[in-house]
Image: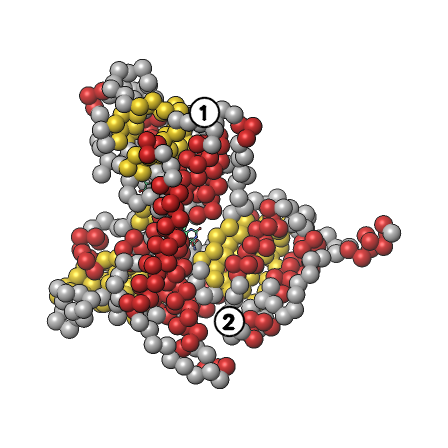
Amino acid sequence: MNKQPDTASDSSAPFDHNIHQNVTRKVSVAVIGAGTAGQNAFRQAKKFLEDVIIINDGFWTTTCIAVGCMPSKLLIAAADRAHDTNHSAEFGVHATARIDGKQVMERVRAERDHFASYIEKQVDSWPEDSKIAGRAYINKQGLIEVNDELIKADKIIVATGSSTFIPDGWEDKLGDTMLTSDAVFELADLPKSMAVIGAGAIGLELAQAFTRLGVKVTVFNRAKRVAGLQDEDINNKAIDCLSRELTMHLGSKITDVGQRSDENSDKSINKNSTVAFIDYEDSAGEVQQWQGDYVLVATGRRNNIEALGVENLGVELDEKNRPQQLDKKTGKIGDLDVYIVGDANANIPLLHVASDEGFSAGSMVCDNKKDAYIRPPATPFSIVFSSPQIVNVGMSLPEIQEDPTLEHVIGKVSFDNQGRSRVMGVNCGLLHIYGCKKTDRILGASMVGPDAEYIGHILAMAITNDLSIKDMLDTPFYHPTILEGLRTALHDVQDLMEIPYQSLDIHQNNS
Ligand SMILES: Cc1cc2nc3c(=O)[nH]c(=O)nc-3n(C[C@H](O)[C@H](O)[C@H](O)COP(=O)(O)OP(=O)(O)OC[C@H]3O[C@@H](n4cnc5c(N)ncnc54)[C@H](O)[C@@H]3O)c2cc1C
Ligand SMILES: NC(=O)c1ccc[n+]([C@@H]2O[C@H](COP(=O)([O-])OP(=O)(O)OC[C@H]3O[C@@H](n4cnc5c(N)ncnc54)[C@H](O)[C@@H]3O)[C@@H](O)[C@H]2O)c1
């Protein structure tokens, strides 16, 4: 736990280094948090500066590898194998998967540990005196308290990540029947049943994976929305595709959660014979109850900043603990010598963003910026690894609609009958591309459908590199691919444009 503010040495002046205290170290740069953002920041700063330290509480192998991106994708990989085995009858291939739950979970952990070992090796190679294992707190004097140390740093990079948000009281009420993404990958075996609360990225990915592995999963979400989709048509299509295999109570209101003893419960899962329950009102307002082995709480994540003491450095936080005056390119806060990067700044809590921001902040703290490379803020881009995948790129539809100068058109393609998607039996989906009428450029896109991760990458590349729709349509699309669906949507955008397609005329006039 964080230490409390040192009231004995209270000071109203932020970052006041003149206050006499028993400083144990003075360094140029302190990085707090050794996840992806912090490790990148440390490595980059260390290239140019000797006296850089990194302080971390908990494991040093990053959230992404230990409990995030990688174990979740490993579970999905096993689930997809099972799903394909069990759903090949339409191809005339009949099989039933025999799922060994213990082996599934063991592989998830073994492969996760394999990835973790590379990070461990890297951290091991850093000088011992530059690493401190412990929870940091920034005191009223702007000094870092950690273990028995009091550290004065000229520049501080905060990379403390985020944690699962659990609604008040649920942890106590659910006890051992509650899971979060931190605990779920430690399950020794697959349970029989599970509720997943939250239909965001974490909830959807894990709910579908466990369903495909034979667990009876029920998803609860308070909004009639999945993955936070903001384009109604795409949201409705995603609900349509996903609900073909997932039981989802969208628009439901949870009124209570808890655990109770049940003699019929599976003792191999729960030695105390307890089961979890959820009292809820369904979307029609009917009072209902769910009962099962576990409740996986996936109700969002919050940045780890509330009790860190960044206010003592002069950082202002809003009511949601988001730092004000954040330079999204570098993580720098106003003109302070403070950088807040990765999930800690609550801007875009995704791995590639944490990685880039950490690298940029690590470059910024070096005096010799000649060798520094500040990465431009990435085009917004997210993928939910459900089947079908859900992707958002660039500006969202509400953002575009808010700006009347962005005269937009929406190019569409359905994947329900798209050639290759149908061949592969993955034909459920919809892509919307938001194009700007005047500039022939893509403003953004939202999609649910097969191969969405690749379509998303192509669209992100087009937006980042300012490619026109015409540039994209002049690029070959191989036949038969799912990506041909992207071309159909681009053609649809073009047909709605005020700029006529001129490729042939231009070439002829110039020759
Ligand atoms: C289940 C799950 C699946 C995900 N899947 C994806 C995905 O597929 N793709 C994707 O892009 N993103 C995914 N994410 C998000 C991604 O994992 C995060 O955006 C990313 O890991 C954040 O990195 P970070 O460096 O900001 O924080 P972290 O890696 O969390 O590092 C923060 C570190 O700071 C430490 N710390 C906190 N407070 C203190 C303190 N006071 N003193 C010292 N140390 C402290 C923490 O213990 C931790 O070690 C997923 C997340 C989860 C939970
Ligand atoms: N593939 C990926 O890139 C990936 C995968 C997993 C996680 N992540 C990252 O992790 C972050 C956190 O993911 P998340 O899914 O936990 O959060 P989220 O904010 O995306 O989704 C939380 C969901 O829980 C619902 N919810 C909240 N409180 C509720 C309640 N009391 N009852 C019912 N529903 C409730 C919300 O309506 C929302 O739909 C994401 O924003 C993303 O940045 C990314």
Q: Residue under label 1, please give it.
A: 335
> Is the CB atom of the residue marked by disc 1 within 8 angstroms of ligand 1's nearest atom?
no
Q: Position of residue 180 (x, y in %)?
A: 28, 55
Q: Position of residue 145 (x, y in %)?
A: 26, 29
Question: Which quadrant would the N terminus be assigned to in this image?
Answer: top left
Going from N to C along the chain, the mark reached first, 1 or 2, is 1
Residue 112, relative to residue 315: is it above or below?
below
Residue 49's tag is none
Instruction: Inspect this view and state whether residue 57 appears.
Output: yes
- The residue where tag 2 is placed is 426
In the image, 392: left or right of 484? left
Query: In this picture, is 87 found above or below 289?
Result: below
Q: Tag 1: residue type?
A: Asp
Q: Can residue 300 be seen in the rendering of this structure?
A: no
Q: Compared to 467, does 27 lie above or below?
A: above
Task: Locate residue 18: give its quadrant.
Answer: top left
Q: Residue at x 55, y 61 (%)?
A: 431
Residue at the (32%, 31%) spot, across then down: 129
* Circle 1 residues within 10 Å: few <14, some 14–19, many ≥20: few
Question: Does 306 sit left or right of 176 as displayed?
Answer: right
In the image, 25 versus 352, the foreground residue is 25
Q: Position of residue 290 (x, y in %)?
A: 24, 67
SS at mark 2? Answer: loop
